[in-house]
Image (spheres, rainbow, N blue to C red):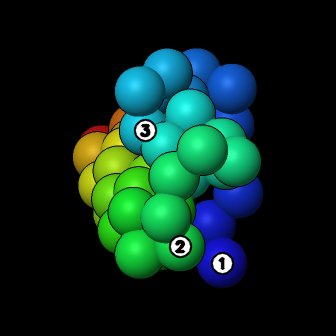
Amino acid sequence: MTHIQPSVHVPALWAAAYGPHHTPAVRLVARCLLRVRAFARDLALADHVPFGGY
């Protein structure tokens, strides 16, 4: 599982994913969206490593 870094937090999604006032289905979808967003960010940063490429 991808570690969600503080810079990746989306306040609305974070509140929906871990807030007590939402249904379990809403929390599940919000957590999945946070994971997808974290994965996309990691994938975008994968090309910018200091030890490879050119």
* Residue 43 visible, this angle: no
SS at mark 1?
A: loop
The three-letter amino acid code for the residue at tag 3 is Leu
Determine the image quadrant of residue 9.
Answer: top right
> Which badge, 1 or 3, comes first in the chain's sequence?
1
Q: Tell me if mark 1 has few (under 14), some (14-19) or many (20+) residues whose alpha carbon lies within 10 angstroms of its own.
A: few
Q: Given this view, does label 1 or label 3 mark the residue nearer the observer?
A: 3
Q: Tell me if mark 2 has few (under 14), some (14-19) or many (20+) residues whose alpha carbon lies within 10 angstroms of its own.
A: few
Residue ID at (35%, 50%):
37
Comparing 46 with 16, the one in front is 16
Q: Tell me if mark 3 has few (under 14), some (14-19) or many (20+) residues whose alpha carbon lies within 10 angstroms of its own.
A: some
SS at mark 2?
A: helix
- The Cα atoms of the two marked residues, 2 and 1, are separated by 20 Å
Comparing 17 with 43, the one in front is 17
Point out the image quarter for the C terminus: top left
The three-letter amino acid code for the residue at tag 2 is Pro
Residue ID at (69%, 26%):
6
Comparing 30 with 35, the one in front is 30
- The Cα atoms of the two marked residues, 3 and 2, are separated by 14 Å
38 sits to left or right of 17:
left
SS at mark 3?
A: helix
The reply to whether dot 3 and dot 2 touch (C-beta < 8 Å) is no
**Residue under label 3:** 13
Q: Given this view, does label 2 or label 1 mark the residue nearer the observer?
A: 2
